[in-house]
Image: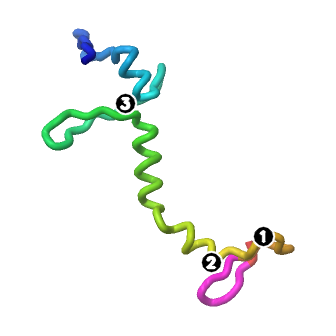
Amino acid sequence: MELAKITTRGQLTLPIEIRRKLKVGEGDKVVFYEENGKIMEENAAKLAFARVREAFDGEGPRLLGRIAPLGSSRPFIYGKTGQYSV
């Protein structure tokens, strides 16, 4: 268990062990949120990247079918109505 103190300006210094576990450093942002009645904290950049990755889950295979194979003289995207030059 780690202890942190809140200053009169409302600032909080994260203990070094917590910063290491979150992989955050000076200038990084940390997100605090409630989950199942507990306050959680996470590295904001990693959380944002995870949400983007979840949003695009399954899109790769769908989009790969629309892109011309490697080695083509010109890249093309195959759409519903035909072939489009990029």
Q: Amino acid at mark 1?
A: Leu
Place residue 1 in its image quadrant.
top left
Q: Amino acid at mark 2?
A: Gly
Mark 3, residue position: 30
Mark 2, residue position: 65
In the image, farthest residue toward the left: 37
Q: Amino acid at mark 3?
A: Val
In the image, farthest residue toward the front: 1
Q: Earlier in the sequence, mark 2 or mark 1?
A: 2
SS class of the residue under badge 1? loop
Percent position of residue 21, x then y: 40, 26
Q: Quick check: marks 2 and 1 in contact, CB under 8 Å?
A: no
Specify start and end residues of the magenta stretch as a single range.
77-84
SS class of the residue under badge 3? strand
In the image, farthest residue toward the bottom: 81
Query: In the image, what residue occupies the spot 56% across and 67% down?
Result: 60
Tell whether position 35 is magenta: no
Query: In the image, what residue occupies the spot 38% across and 17% down?
Result: 17
Q: Quick check: marks 3 and 2 in contact, CB under 8 Å?
A: no
